[in-house]
Image (cartoon, rainbow, N blue to C red):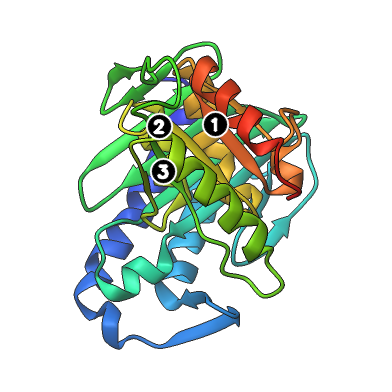
């Protein structure tokens, strides 16, 4: 395992342990609202601090972009951290949340970890070395088109989100596929696509920390990740479309019919 990936795994496991120790009291813990339907708990903050501590001890000069505490330092070497993706699920005891950590050099994603501490599933990827689930190689599903495909998505939840535009795309995909799943943790959705549990994924309004690790998992598992126009600006725009090459192409063709 690459040394950078080893540090990311160590940090993710420590954050996951913090979440698991707090899970039984999650419904009664204090919650702050960052914005409408966007919550943060002490678990998010402690898990993030633990990740930053592990990374900082190994690479003190590296920059960090973290969901709760923002940007730390400036460097070509940067870590992108979501300490608890799926906080709303966690607060309700809904078993779909994860730790997401990515490392990039000069804006190019190099290492990725998505860790589900509840199911003990560790998704990892290193650029050029493929993607793994618990040390077993994974690949995207080989479906040839949208017929029979299972897609993942996330509903717009922030204020001023383009809900009408999103619902139009949802309606279109529902008519072309076997079904749509919205589980509430984008990092895990992307990891599931990387290992073939989903055939495709699309969502709007995400943040870099929601997508960075999952995007590398998918590309290393043989998939394609773009923005909604088919370009490479998904980390900036927040709109993402992913799948194997054929499913991705079909999704982009459908999305071109809508003004998003």
Mark linked to residue 220: none
Residue lying farthest to the top in this orientation:
128
Which residue does the numbered mark 1 point to in the structure image? Answer: 242
Which residue is rendered at x = 32% and y = 55% of the image?
Answer: 16
Decide which of 112, 245 is in the foreground and name it. 245
Looking at the image, do the residues carrying marks 2 and 3 touch, with CB atoms under 8 Å apart? yes
Which residue is rendered at x = 67% and y = 75% of the image?
Answer: 159
- In the rendered view, would you say 34 is above or below 134? below
Looking at the image, do the residues carrying marks 3 and 1 touch, with CB atoms under 8 Å apart? no
- On the image, the x and y values in percent for residue 151 come to 41, 38
On screen, residue 165 versus residue 231, left or right, reads left
The local secondary structure at tag 2 comes to: helix
Decide which of 46, 171 is in the foreground and name it. 171
Decide which of 75, 156 is in the foreground and name it. 156
Crowd class of label 1 (few under 14; some 14 to 19; many from 20; radius 10 Å): many
Which residue does the numbered mark 3 point to in the structure image? Answer: 189
Mark 2 and mark 1 lie on one chain; the one further toward the N terminus is: 2
Which residue does the numbered mark 2 point to in the structure image? Answer: 193
Q: CA distance from mark 2 to mark 3?
A: 6 Å
Mark 3 and mark 1 lie on one chain; the one further toward the N terminus is: 3
């Amino acid at each position: 395992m690459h040394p950078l990936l080893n540090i990311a795994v160590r940090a993710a496991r420590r954050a996951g342990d913090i979440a698991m120790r707090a899970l039984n009291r999650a419904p009664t813990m204090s919650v702050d609202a960052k914005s409408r339907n966007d919550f943060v708990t002490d678990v998010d903050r402690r898990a993030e601090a633990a990740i930053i501590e592990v990374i900082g001890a190994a690479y003190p000069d590296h920059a960090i972009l973290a969901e709760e505490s923002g940007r730390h330092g400036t460097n070509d070497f940067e870590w992108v951290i979501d300490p608890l993706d799926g906080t709303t699920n966690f607060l309700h005891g809904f078993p779909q949340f994860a730790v997401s950590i990515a490392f990039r050099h000069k804006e190019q994603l190099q290492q990725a970890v998505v860790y589900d501490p509840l199911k003990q599933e560790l998704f990892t990827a290193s650029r050029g070395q493929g993607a793994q689930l618990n040390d077993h190689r994974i690949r995207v599903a080989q479906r040839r088109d949208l017929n029979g495909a299972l897609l993942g998505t996330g509903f717009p939840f922030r204020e001023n989100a383009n809900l009408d535009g999103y619902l139009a795309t949802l309606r279109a995909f529902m008519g072309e596929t076997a079904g749509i799943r919205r589980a509430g943790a984008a990092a895990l959705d992307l990891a599931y696509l990387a290992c073939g549990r989903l055939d495709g994924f699309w969502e709007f309004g995400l943040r870099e920390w929601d997508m960075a690790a999952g995007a590398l998992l998918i590309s290393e598992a043989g998939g394609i990740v773009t923005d909604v126009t088919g370009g490479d600006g998904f980390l900036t725009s927040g709109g993402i479309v992913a799948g194997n090459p054929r499913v991705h192409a079909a999704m982009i063709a459908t999305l071109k019919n809508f003004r998003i």
